[in-house]
């Protein structure tokens, strides 16, 4: 069971892990061992609450397909166990990120005093620049 929060968890059978060969430099190990992890999680067919499912679909993340399948490839480490833990941690972080609801922004207007201060400052600056001109006798 993968814990997302105190009340939400994902059963292990809903997460599909496959081990593949890692890309990039690494010597002989890269060619022989399947140390990278390919994680697939179908959020829409899972036991996640509806709130999480909706929020995951609205996230703009390249790891989430249009039908809600999350695909994470972990190949940061040399061992399978570390990459597996990394992939699961990234899945948890992605789901937690989807659960965060940002405060709605309310547009505000500048106060009359702040507008006056801004215009006074501009006038003062303009007067300084005007005083730099040629002196006419």
Image (spheres, helix red, strand yellow):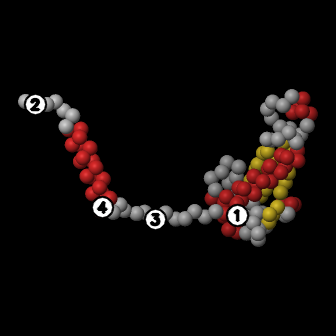
Name the one closer to the observer, 131 or 12: 131
- Which residue is label 3 attached to? 106
- Which residue is label 2 attached to? 136
Residue visible at 86% across and 60% down?
12
**Disc 2 to disc 3, C-alpha distance:** 53 Å
Which one is earlier in the sequence, the residue at label 4 or at label 1? 1
Discs 1/2, front: 2
**Disc 2 to disc 4, C-alpha distance:** 37 Å
User: Mark 2–mark 4 contact, CB under 8 Å?
Assistant: no
Which one is earlier in the sequence, the residue at label 2 or at label 4? 4
Discs 4/1, front: 4
**Disc 4 to disc 1, C-alpha distance:** 47 Å
**Disc 1 to disc 3, C-alpha distance:** 27 Å
Q: Which mark is residue 53?
A: 1
Answer with left or right where residue 60 lies relative to residue 33.
left
Q: Which mark is residue 113?
A: 4
Which one is earlier in the sequence, the residue at label 1 or at label 2? 1
Q: Would you place residue 116 above or below residue 49 in this image?
A: above
């Amino acid at each position: 069971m993968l814990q997302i929060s105190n009340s939400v968890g994902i059963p292990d059978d809903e997460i599909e892990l496959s081990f593949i060969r890692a890309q990039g430099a690494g010597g002989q190990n890269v060619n022989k061992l399947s140390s990278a992890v390919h994680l697939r999680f179908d959020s829409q067919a899972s036991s996640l609450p509806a709130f999480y499912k909706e929020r995951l679909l609205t996230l703009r993340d390249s790891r989430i397909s249009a039908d809600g399948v999350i695909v994470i490839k972990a190949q940061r480490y040399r061992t399978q166990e570390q990459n597996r833990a990394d992939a699961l941690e990234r899945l948890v972080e992605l789901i937690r990120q989807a659960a965060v609801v940002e405060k709605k922004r309310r547009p505000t207007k500048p106060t009359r005093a702040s507008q006056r201060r801004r215009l006074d400052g501009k006038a003062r600056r303009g007067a300084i620049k005007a005083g730099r001109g040629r002196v006419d006798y």
